[in-house]
Image: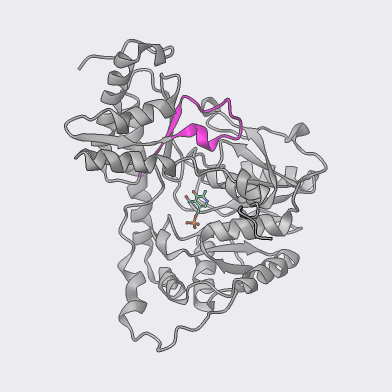
Amino acid sequence: MTSNSTPKISRRALEMPQNAIRHLVPLAEAAERRGVHVHRLNIGQPDIVTPPELSAPLESSLPSVFAYGHSAGDLSLRRALRNDLARVGAQVHEDDILVTHGASEALTFALTALCDAGDEVLTPDPTYANYLGFSASLGVGLRPIPTFAEDRWALPSTLGDRVNSKTRAILLSNPGNPTGAFYSREVLSGLLQAARRHDLWLIVDEVYRGLVFGEHPAYSALSLDDPEHRVIVVESTSKRYSTCGLRIGALVTRNAAIREATMSFAQARLSCSVLSQQMVAQIDTLDEDAREAITNTYRERLALTHELLATIPGVYAPPAEGAFYQMATLPVRDASRFVRFLVEEFSCDGETVLVAPAAGFYLDPTRGIDQIRIACVLGLDSLRAALRCLAAGLRAYLAAHPDQGVGAPPPRAT
Ligand SMILES: Cc1ncc(COP(=O)(O)O)c(C=O)c1O
């Protein structure tokens, strides 16, 4: 008998959350079709030119057969990544490094290796939105550790009753997306101690490693005192070296059992792009000035963004200390509605701005509703124009929808 319907799809597929940021892109595209220039500060796609040194392999003769690479990654790239870690005081062997398709694949490898369906992972709330997707696709629960802008996103001193028999790991990004928080070596050592007390793994996502702007120097969690090797670092060159589309990241661990398990996953997907690996291996040829220039670029952008946000009445935005994101609490009831207004109904001299409503980064559905995240991925002039649109847009929104404002002083006239 022939069935007229298709077989059902999995519960995991149905429960997979939508990416909370990308769904606004069609609205920005529609605004652009109307002739409005949209300053896109919604996703962490750096505009910084990929270092030209990385193109060197493209200029030499390419192989006649692009064969599969080694499942663990090319040795030259693993050595370059090892040297990159050594620059921030973490000594690892190249065999501790498994090259992956971006940090995204490293994260799924880590979660798959550590957790069975039904297990739980603790993560600061707000958190990187795709952790929700990665964990949902594996049937793993994410349990929030609430953090607050007013406390500069500080972590609580104990994990308390958040740990239960199903808890396997703590997962956080440091420097952090979306918060821009940077947890110092002392803070992360404390978290590692808590992980030891509760016998948990500690997964540290260091995609933004090196992009730190405050008093604390950059470091890797792999340089912490970790006798049982419970730290697993996932990293990537996507952000630091502006190589998002090359899709190169890594999982780094000194733990033999995790290395073996994740290597089996890597063998099952055969290899990463050999050409991307050759290109990214060239990061080893960059001089310190090139690295510093990238950090300084983001430092200036965040400083400007913070300064301009401070001039907008009713906005609360403590300065970011790392990565390239600035969170801001707005004097509105629903920042999502305001963001839609900016791209659907508003323009200022033919321009507007797209930012990320922050609710999509929170596990707790009651939090972040009045917040946005600004990705400082455009140059200073564009940021100035974008922040001008944000301020003017906020005035226009509150004037058009006075019931949507909260606790704000009356909008300032210009
Ligand atoms: C905290 C964090 N982890 C991982 C990723 C994904 O990185 P990749 O491009 O290397 O997959 C991102 C991208 O925005 C991120 O912000």
Q: Nearer the viewer, residue 93 or 317?
A: 317
Q: Residue furthest left?
A: 349
Q: Nearer the viewer, residue 269 or 155?
A: 269
Q: Nearer the viewer, residue 2 or 386?
A: 2
Q: Residue at x 32, y 20 (%)?
A: 397
Q: Residue furthest right?
A: 165
Q: Residue at x 30, y 68 (%)?
A: 52
Residue 338, compared with residue 378, is above or below; it is above
Residue 22, compared with residue 251, is above or below; it is above
Q: Where does residue 137 sit, x and y in percent of width and height?
A: 63, 51
Residue 231, compared with residue 156, is above or below; it is below
Colour scheme:
one colour
- Please check the rendered image and state whether residue 373 is part of the magenta-colored stretch, yes or no: yes
Q: Where does residue 248 sit, x and y in percent of width and height?
A: 48, 65
Q: Where does residue 386 sit, x and y in percent of width and height?
A: 27, 35
**In-image side of 368 versus 275 (left or right):** right
User: The magenta stretch spans which residues?
Assistant: 357-376
- The quadrant in which the C terminus is found is top left
Q: Residue at x 62, y 57 (%)?
A: 108
Q: Report the number of discs.
A: 0
Q: Nearer the viewer, residue 88 or 304?
A: 304
Q: Residue at x 41, y 61 (%)?
A: 245
**In-image side of 152 versus 324 (left or right):** right
